[in-house]
Amino acid sequence: MTTKTMRPPVHRPPVMKPIIDPRRGDIEDDALSTKRRSLFALAGTLVAEISLPKLIAAWFILIIGPGLILGLAPQVALGWASTLQAKITAPYAGLGALLLFLVVVAIGWFGGRPLFRAAESNFWQLNSLAVQPFYVICREALRHLAEKLLPADATEAGRATLRSATSAAAGVVLCCLSLAAVLHAWPSSAWVGDIADLASPHRLAMTALANSVVLIGAYLTAAALVWSLADAAMPQPRALRDFAAAGSPAASSSASPARSWRVAHLSDLHAVGEPYGLRIESGRSGPCGNGRIKALLERLELVHAAEPLDRILVTGDTTDAGRSAEWAAFFDALKLHPRLAERMLVLPGNHDLNVVDRANPARLDLPMSPNKRLRQLRVLSAMAAIQGAGVRVVDRVKGELGATLAAALKPHLASLTQFADTGSWRQAGRLSAVWLDVFPQVLPPETEDGLGIILLNSNADTHFSFTNALGLVSAEDVKAVEIALAHYPRARWIVALHHHLVEYPMPARALSERIGTALINGSWFVRRLSSLADRIVVMHGHRHLDWIGECAGLTIVSAPSPVMEASDTCETYFYVHTLVASEGGRLQLRRPERVVVKGASSE
């Protein structure tokens, strides 16, 4: 009789098939997505979830308080002037008022730079709040309606004329509305005050607010016309036609060799901090996790191996909401590609800095909140790690290029590290000054007539998730750009920023697609660069669309997002640009190389 050997049973893991695949998310992941929800639905969320106490505090700090100060200023100034005039004839009677005037002048003189920064910031914040949104909505609505009426065979020149006309018309409409507000508030205003007005604070406040409405309305009346006429008079943007011919580039002079530079332009990677995290804007219509970013870097590695890249430029929105975990995920992906990291340059986008809360568009940060400074600190830390030893900051006092970014940050490292742990208000104020001083960042050309790169921070300060996308380049930063350009008068330059300078001349299916978030002062910025337009190429991201064009002689390159606007199974792409040194010191583009990043398997 034989005995059978008993084999132990084979344990197989159970087949787990959840009803819904948690890796693909659900309706909650579409909370902020403009691709999956209408603007009306987002507005409903805004009303339902907003913190009323915080909103009231923000309104008082950012609008009502400054409005009262602005309205009281003419009463105080004119009252003081009339008192001084009455007493100036008596010997020494006006010395007190004159001394006060001299103190005010001294404060303005010695505190000039901080006061100028504050005044400029508030000036453009006023434009971003009161002028730009209404003007853009009116202009784009008129364009949308007018282009619907244009014949299909309308010429590009005809469409450009139409865009100029709608810019002027939008300014006239906004001018009339602001003038109506001025006329309505004028009867309640009063411009000369005295000490007796303090007996009725409520009446004084109402008068001050009426004065503020008159002053701001008068400014808007003039600004709307100036803004619109500047837009209308500037050459309209159009697609670029004059690409440099492939083959041998023309030499910049008979004495220097022909040269070209290969630059991979990436933007809007939107790294998330969770393995299966979905993006704010795309929700379930976008990719899951960071697999797309890893595939992109692997593809870029192959491109570099086949034909070396000179630089890799990432024009903002490296992260989805500026969180520490998102930056960590980006660095985890990048550390596997050291050859790419040593060629990379990054700059901040609105998602890196201005998104207050990934899950709540109604979230407000008050101006004194340290959270915005923490997001700035994370960006500073990332830039220092990636490009700190290569780029230089501008010494505005001496009017020359200063220390490297790493050297400029070195005296502040202890306080920056401490701020990351404590988030104190005092250290937040110091970080604010450091943040302003490290932009723009300049990668100098390797030779006097080589290619340099200037990195700008084009993000306007916002404290509200729903308005995070506004762009601004300060006058101080533009002056620093001009210092860098003057330091290398024979060099060519890439000027890189996140926001687009002008709205694209592209057809749109719906009005919502036309309400853009270009630079608040884009027309002014284009004009400041236009004198050196033949030596500059501007590269940006933000809109996730690829477009290469020119405006006022300035070449503008918009990068598509190789991550957004597509699910995991779809192909995405980015471009490698070849910049060519042409005759007379010009900088030209060849037709770009389109690099496809294949989608993942649907299995």
Image (cartoon, helix red, strand yellow):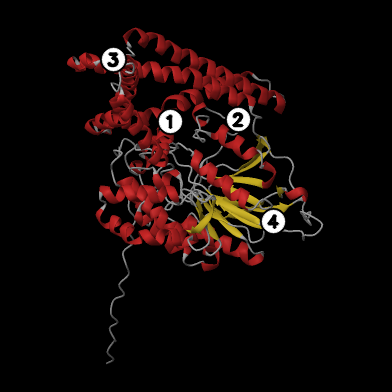
Q: Quadrant of residue 310?
A: bottom right
Residue that extends furthest to the top in the rendered view of this protein: 187
Residue matched to label 3: 193
Q: Provide the secondary structure element on which disc 1 rests.
A: helix
Residue at far right of view: 254
Q: Judging from the image, what secondary structure is the residue with disc 4 in?
A: loop
The amino acid sitting under disc 1 is: Phe
CB under 8 Å between discs 1 and 2: no
Residue at left offset 28%, top offset 43%: 369
Q: Amino acid at mark 3?
A: Gly
Q: Position of residue 213 (x, y in %)?
A: 37, 17
- Name which residue type carries label 4: Asp
Name the residue carrying label 4.
Answer: 449
The mark nearer the N terminus, 4 or 2, is 4
For the question of whether residue 64 can be seen, the reply is no
- Left or right of 90? Residue 259 is right
Q: Mark 2 vs mark 3: which is more N-terminal? A: 3
Of the pair 109 and 448, the residue shown nearer to us: 109
Alpha-carbon span between mark 1 and mark 2: 32 Å
Residue 151 pos. (x, y %): 68, 20
Residue 26 location, x and y as percent? 35, 44
Q: Residues within 10 Å of mark 4 (few under 14, many from 20)?
A: some
Q: Which residue is mark 2?
A: 507
Query: Does label 4 or label 1 sit earlier along the sequence?
Result: 1
Q: CA distance from mark 4 to mark 1?
A: 38 Å
**214, above or below 11, in the image:** above
